[in-house]
Amino acid sequence: MAEELLKLENIYKNFGNVKVLKDVNIKINKGEVVALIGDNGAGKSTLIKVITGVHSPNSGKVFFKEKEVQIKSVAQSRKMGIEAVYQERALCDQQELFRNIFAGREITNSFGFLDIKKQRKEAEKILRDYIGFTSKAITVDSPVMGLSGGEKQGVAFGRSLYFNSDLIVLDEPTMGLSIQETEKVLNFVKGLKNENKSAIFIDHNIIHVYGAADRFIILDRGEVVGEFNKEDISREELVKKMIQLHESGKIKVEN
Amino acid sequence: MSSLLNSYFVKTHKLEISITIIAIVLFLIYFLGAPHVFTRFPIYRAFMQSMPFFGIIAISATFVVTLGEIDLSFPSIVGITSLIFGIIMTSTDGNFFIAFILATSLGMFAGLVNGLLVTKIGIPSIVATIGTLFFWRGLVNVISQGSGIAIVDVADGTWHHMIFVEKLFGKIPMQFIWFIVLTGLMQWVYRYHKFGNHIHFVGDNKASAQMMGINVDNVKIIAFVQLGFFSALAGIFTMYEMLYFWPTQGEGLMLTTLAAVFVGGTSVFGGKGTIFGTFIGVLIIGSLESGIVALGLSGFYVKFINGLMITVAVTVYALIQRRKN
């Protein structure tokens, strides 16, 4: 039996009168890659933000490593070992790479002054060892602006590996990327499993999702409407289910 | 090797280098056009005397502008804090510590109000600070009833007068020394302190900064509070120089101060800026009036050339920015 990493129980989240999440229950095991799929407005992003501490749920319980927790801030979720990799939004364009990598958790002395030397050295290590950047054009002092989408995603991944997080949350990691870069990103995701790290990710492209994930959770209008293991469903069946859901608003679960 | 270092330095300091060159050219023009004035010390002493009053605020305002925000209320914060400083100095027979602490606290409180209006209530800073600009000036008028306060009896000849505005070695105004020290300190905070780092991230992209775990509201509030503090400090410097409070005190500061920040190269769009650039901006904006008059042009040209400098500088920076994108 796989070891449980994260469990959400009866999660509700409202924004004013809009019920965005309704009684969501999900579980993620160690070393498992879970894909969240669903239409726009299904509540995928909100669910992810509950996990990363951007939003607090209105009710429901969150367990991390089998202990009940209340995730109140991004800083707290990071400390617990949850790291979010948001598409290009993860980085600030005009700032240097080494500043981006440590944004929000700078290496400082006790007066709050940055240890620039150490940050640059560690950033160098991340670029070289975790991401495998070999291009001379990109250094730790380059502003993020000059990077391609895949390179930005790589930096965000490298950052999460460096900080040794247990659960990596990926929001549309392949959106707007070229085919080659998409390939790279999906390889990153597959590589996580080898390190016994878990990931949860949102992607619109079922083909990407299918290749990289072990399990699929389908959300529709704030509710979990289906959950499949990869060995139980083929790519074609998964696509068919999604179309079915899209057309009828329901999903047939045969078991 | 050294040429490599140089080219890296040049690449990462384009703005600072261009603004410095502009300043050097400008001073060369002064120098060649009016050597009888610019080869002598008094003009520089006059600069050193007058620039710090708006220079200190410009350095501090660079933080707020880097956030992509603006504060238009600081001239009135200078007014209200100077008034309080004057009232307490005269009513306590020159108790510097109480006057200083209360005036700077009031300045920080005014900054806090700005910060809360912008972050918690959600009013755009340009609108919120127009409101507080009128509010604090109005309060000055109500309290002072339009009359000034002389602090000459309680301030002149004291140790605090000495450390604020008297001349070092009989030549260099103390306020300029303070201005240099504060610029150095703020540059350090701006580039190498966590707070300065967060200022850049929030100004660059608020949503990303939030997702990276930076407390966006707190960063903004602190930025406004420190500007309130330095506005009060600039007011106190002015009080010691003039030994007099007048109800319009601070009113002329708005345009020169913001002009220095923008001419200095801090991005109007937020996320990028330079304290050193602002410092050079202060030297440029603060010298224009005397420079133009010394060159033999009439005083009517001052505003015109000021406007030209600002418009051209901001346009050039915007174009550099656009090309990068």
Image: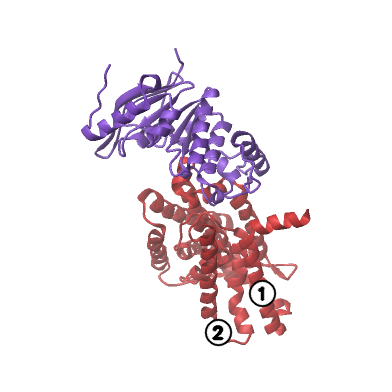
Chain colours: A purple, B red
Name the spot of residue B26 as percent of width and height, x first: 64, 75
Q: CA distance from mark 2 to mark 1?
A: 21 Å
Q: Are marks 2 and 1 in contact (CB under 8 Å)?
A: no
Residue for badge 1: B25
Q: Which image quadrant for residue B9?
A: bottom right
Instruction: Examine the rendering and report whether any part of residue B122 can be seen.
Output: yes
Q: Which mark is residue B45?
A: none
Q: Secondary structure at mark 1?
A: helix
Q: Which image quadrant for residue B237?
A: bottom right
* Front one among B258 and B146: B258
**Label 2, residues with CA under 10 Å away: few <14, some 14-19, many ≥20:** few
Q: Chain of mark 1?
A: B
Name the spot of residue B138 as percent of width and height, x first: 39, 66
Residue for badge 2: B299
| Amino acid found under the numbered disc labelled 1 | Val
| Amino acid found under the numbered disc labelled 2 | Gly
Q: Residue at x 73, y 71 (%)?
A: B171
Q: Secondary structure at mark 2?
A: loop
* Front one among A124 and B129: A124
Q: Residue at x 21, y 32 (%)?
A: A248
Instruction: Examine the rendering and report whether any part of residue B215 can be seen.
Output: no
